[in-house]
Amino acid sequence: MSKSYYNRFNQYRILWVFVSFDLPTETKTDRKNYAVFRKNLKQDGFSMLQFSIYARHCNSRENAEVHIKRVKSFLPKKGEVILFTLTDKQFGMMEFFRGKSPGEKPETPQQLELF
């Protein structure tokens, strides 16, 4: 098989996990829960795309499921959280803007080939 075949295959095998949330911040306890939730996301390797959207690169579906399960373990009691995945191919088709100017995409971690 050619290298381009594997590259194309990897674009569908590699996933991005997204966490979108809308958490209350009216009380001191709510703000603390919000901060703890964001801190846990960062500790699990998620990067902020926007204020309430975090994303994480995963090398496989199994790896993505581990991180989804981990996020579910520290969900806050209040608010809404949406978890979803996109393939690397779909992520590559996303467009980012800062105002009307094209913005930079987040860095994609290098994938190691062992074979």
Image (cartoon, helix red, strand yellow):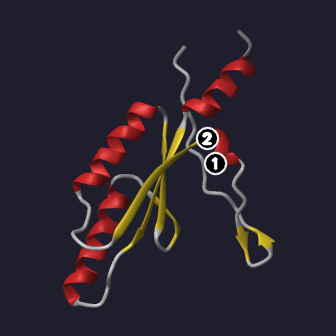
Of residues 84 and 95, the one drawn nearer to the viewer in this rendering: 84
The percent coordinates of residue 39 (x first, y second) are 31, 66
In the rendered structure, the answer to whether residue 10 lies left or right of residue 8 reads: left
**Residue where numbered disc 1 is placed:** 91
Q: Residue at x 75, y 22 (%)?
A: 4
Q: Amino acid at mark 2?
A: Asp
Q: Quadrant of the N terminus?
A: top right
The percent coordinates of residue 101 (x first, y second) are 80, 73
- Residue 113: image quadrant is top right
**Residue where numbered disc 2 is placed:** 88
Q: Amino acid at mark 1?
A: Phe
| 57 lies above or below 1 | below
Circles 1 and 2: CB atoms closer than 8 Å: yes
Other residues around mark 2 within 10 Å, as few (<14) / some (14–19) / many (≥20): many
Label 2 element class? helix
In the rendered structure, the answer to whether residue 98 lies left or right of residue 59 reads: right
Q: Residue at x 71, y 19 (%)?
A: 5
Label 1 element class? helix
Of residues 83 and 40, the one drawn nearer to the viewer in this rendering: 83
| 11 lies above or below 76 | above
